[in-house]
Image (cartoon, grey):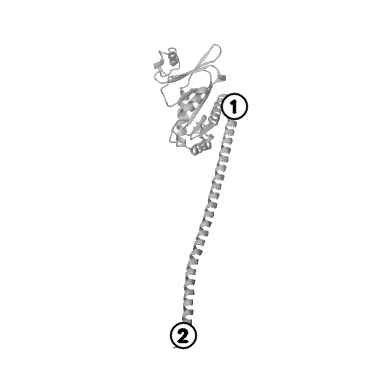
Amino acid sequence: MNTEIFTNPIFIAVAALLIIIAIWFIVYYFKNRNQVKQVEEAKDKERQTLVDKYESEQEEERLSHKKELSNLNEKYYNDTTLLDNKLSSLHQFSVDKGEYLTDLALIQLKEKLVNEEKIRETDMIILSNVYLPSRNYTNTRKIDHLVLTRTGIYLIDSKYWSGHILHGINEDQFETVPYVESFFDLLSLDKKQEQTLIFEKADNQNVSVNHYNSIIDETKITAEKLKNKLKLQYDIVPIIYFNPKDNGNYSITNYSEDPSIRVIVGQEDLEAFFLKYVFHGRFQYTVKDLDEIANAILDQSL
């Protein structure tokens, strides 16, 4: 082999140049490859940022649309429920003026509370003329009014009335109201048990006296039966409501120590009761619960 070639200065110079070029090319390649990689990573990051922004905007738009749809559905439900209640009230008027006026008082109370932003439309549901059938359908119970709220359910027996009520009276009050004992004797009432007597003007010369305990007991039983039928955790509160005729003279004296039933006279006292006891109590039901209970009551009604 001719070694002169490898020792030739020109060959050495060319070889050195080629080695330098190769080294430069390798350095250039790796340097640019890192730059290309950095550019690609920057573009991937920018692309992901755009995708995330788009998805976020789409999610916000979806939630906004869902909220708007929910508000429209709620408004539709509230409007139709209110209209149904008013139509139901108008239907009642032809049957029982007292029940109609009670229903109207409840609707006006709800509208007032909603307008004052004390409750929402869905926090109070008013049902009227509900029928609770027995197993053999021979002892169907009529419920004048049911008021469903988040703090409890109230069953109202409504009477159109004028006069004076002695509620929860027994022999302990005979000294205070001596004339009452004769009515206990006349009606053969248990003097130890609380009784409810109603004095009404029959005409210009006569006064009628009615014994109301059977209706009170029946209202309590109906509330208990409805609770059991719906399998509710909490008791349904029975209320006897006397709606005064034509805002005439009326009064009530309440001697009762029985907390299981409320006796209310007049729209003012009815409103005061709901404001004091109903909308300041502990929540028992959600809005969804009230809706499901109302549907269950209507489904089993006749």
Q: Is residue 242 visible?
A: no
**Residue 71 in view in this figure:** yes
* Number of the label disc, if any, that sits on residue 287: none
Vertical comparison of 247 with 54: above or below:
above
193 lies left or right of 62: left
x then y, percent, for residue 136: 49, 34
Residue type of the residue flagged with mark 1: Phe
Q: Nearer the viewer, residue 55 or 259?
A: 55
Residue under numbered circle 1 = 93
The part of the image, by quadrant, that contains residue 233 is top left
- Residue pushed farthest front? 9
Q: Are marks 1 and 2 in contact (CB under 8 Å)?
A: no
Secondary element type, mark 2: helix
Q: Nearer the viewer, residue 264 or 297?
A: 264
Identify residue type, mark 2.
Answer: Ile
Percent x, y of residue 207:
52, 14
Residue 5's disc is 2
Packing grade of label 1 (10 A; few <14, some 14-19, many >=20) is some
